Image: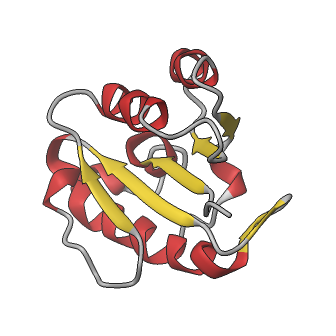
Amino acid sequence: MTVPLVIVDGANVVGSVPDGWWRDRAAAAGRLRDALAPVITAGLPDLPGPVEVALVVEGKAKDVEPSGNGVSIVRADGSGDDAIADLARAQTPERRVVVITADRGLRDRVTVSGAEVRGPTSVPRR
């Protein structure tokens, strides 16, 4: 059985909490990376673990370092939305893919390739 993939729109999820993230985008991405680690084993509601978690970062958030906690960091060469859509599209049809974002345009792009979409509150953010 294929392990489901949870793709997290880092900019969108970090931006959903007005906690001063804009002062240090890489640190904010690091906090999100660390908060996502339990999802690997616990999963999400209606998506039991284990799951693979990919955090997509762009811009200054790309300076975030990997931590070895199991959350993979995907550094977008350009648009984070493009990287997320490409990653979702690259999965086999048998693999369950869940994208975490509130971006309506991105939602439309990834559901075409069979991905599910959930909002930022569906994952821990701190």
Q: Left or right: where does residue 88 sit relative to residue 118?
A: left
Residue found 42% across the figure and 57% down from its top? 54
Q: Which image quadrant for residue 77?
A: top left
Residue 38 drawn at (x, y percent): 59, 80
On screen, residue 91 versus residue 119, left or right, reads left
State the residue in front, 102 or 45: 45
Q: Position of residue 113 (x, y in %)?
A: 57, 23
Q: Answer with the quarter of the image where residue 59 lies.
A: top left
Quarter containing the N terminus? bottom right
Q: Is residue 56 above or below residue 87?
A: below
* Residue 41 percent coordinates (x, y): 64, 81
Q: Identify whether 11 is placed above or below 54.
A: above
Q: Quadrant of residue 98?
A: top right
The residue closer to the viewer here, 101 or 31, is 101
What residue sits 49% from the left and 62% below the top?
A: 53
**Residue 8 versus residue 116 in the image, above or below:** below
